[in-house]
Image (cartoon, rainbow, N blue to C red):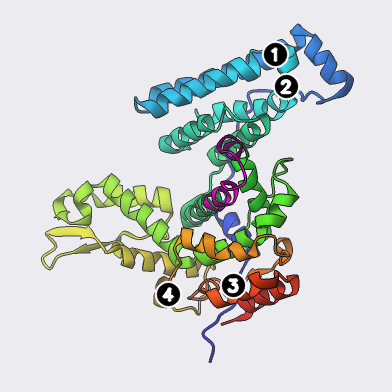
Amino acid sequence: MSSSVEGFTAAGWSQLAAQAAKTMHTDAGGIDLPAIAPSGAAWAAFKQSPELRAAYTAQLNTTIKNIQQFVGQHASTGAQRQKAIGNLNHFLQTRVNCNADKLSPLVVNESRRNLNLFAQQLNNPNIPADKKLSCALALAEGLGVCNEGETLNILENTRDLCSQQTGLAGVLTRAKNNLIEQHLQQLVRHEDKPRLNDKLALQLEIHHIQALKNHVAGQWGLEVVEDRYATQAYQNQAGPMAEELLRQTITPAVLANTVAEQIAQTFCNHTHSKLSTGIPTEQLKTEPLRRAIQAEFGSEIELENCLEFNADYTQVKLKPLAEISLHVIEKCQDLGLINPHANPVGVLKQSTPDLQACIKQVGFLRGAPANNPAHSPMLCNFWAGYTKTVVSDSEKKRHQKENSPADVVRILRKLDIQT
């Protein structure tokens, strides 16, 4: 009898996001400035009128200065802090306080609105301070590229700052999105290094990652973001590789272990760094710790399943990471993310190929016909307690020999249905 269970559906990620969603009140500070049509008479009049431009550039100056002030107050002294403030200054000088002819509609419209919202949310007490700082540093880090790249980066970090996804569902969604971002970044770097010089590869990296995220959006519950440099041509080139890479390397076990590491770190942060090896029980402030864990992970993660005591209860320590990961897997089943009939221990024992090795292995899919990813109803054999290994060398050579589209489709179907 096959041990396969129904694959995880894209709708499941949407349901998980709905469980995690929490409405955030965002005070827009009154009626925002209207957008300026990016071409034609309206844009020409905007560039020619210092009075009209003043309100827009003044808002941009204010919001950038507020972000700079926040970074200056909260970031640790060092190169990262200095670079962030410098990048924000450079943005002001080259994108905002520049000659009218050099103003971009993207900066005046999209980036201005998002930066204004970003600066407002830095004062939102419901957002953790460390999240505010990480988003501010990431936003500043992404400046200094092309207009489109900066606009996309500002959008992503504003969305991240304003996303109030709560509980374990929110943690799982963020962990999944972060893993996708990291793995696609490595794929893009591997693909672009032989074809592009270092400067151009760096400039296009964010766009090529977005192209692949758009390609797999229907499978992984992501939002498609329009970007003229996130081209269909790049999706055609590397999209099938991205599909297979993510299917191979982002497994329930990887996701559970990632979240378990976050849980363990949070326990140590709120108690003692030596909790992993053991501390006197009298140092454990149970109720404050429980409230802190619930605030970050929701009520699904329970102290009793993450801590263990010695025989006379005088010492307490974190349970092994594998046991915390098992707790996460079981809670994923409760949330409906993993099939309730799957064996949690079997799910956790899934083997996952090395990321870099897998990137090389999926190279035979470069330019292969897409397996209709935008409409695929499920990640076949996903969340079933195991994943497929990468394609064998003999299979890869057979498909490289003639690079036949029919053969590529056949192997993709084989990967999808093999149990």
> Tag 1 or tag 4, which sits nearer the N-term?
1
- Foreground residue among 190 and 274: 190
Which is in the foreground here, disc 3 or disc 4? 3
Residue 33, disc = 2
Q: Amino acid at mark 4?
A: Pro
Vertically, is 25 above or below 194? Answer: above
Q: Which mark is residue 55?
A: 1
SS class, disc 4: helix
Helix, strand or loop at label 2? It is: loop
- The outermost residue toward the front is 401
Secondary structure type for disc 1: helix
Instruction: Place residue 277 in its image quadrant.
Output: bottom left
Please say whether residue 121 is one of the residues in the magenta stretch. Answer: no
Dominant SS of magenta comes to helix
Tell whether 318 sits left or right of 340.
left
Distance in Å between CA atoms under marks 3 and 2: 56 Å
The percent coordinates of residue 302 (x first, y second) are 35, 60
Give the class, few, some or many, for how many residues have Cα within 10 Å of label 1's Cα (few <14, many ≥20): few
Q: In the rendered view, tell whether residue 355 sits above or below residue 126.
A: below
Residue type, label 1: Ala
The tag on residue 100 is none
Q: Position of residue 267 (x, y in %)?
A: 30, 51
Q: From mark 4 to mark 2, how far is it between C-alphas?
A: 53 Å
Mark 2–mark 1 contact, CB under 8 Å? yes
**Residue sitting farthest toward the right:** 41
Distance between mark 2 and mark 1 Cα atoms:
8 Å
Please provide the residue range marked out in magenta. Answer: 186-203
Q: Residues within 10 Å of mark 4 (few under 14, many from 20)?
A: many
Residue 362, placed above or below residue 417? above
104 over 172 or under it: above or below = above
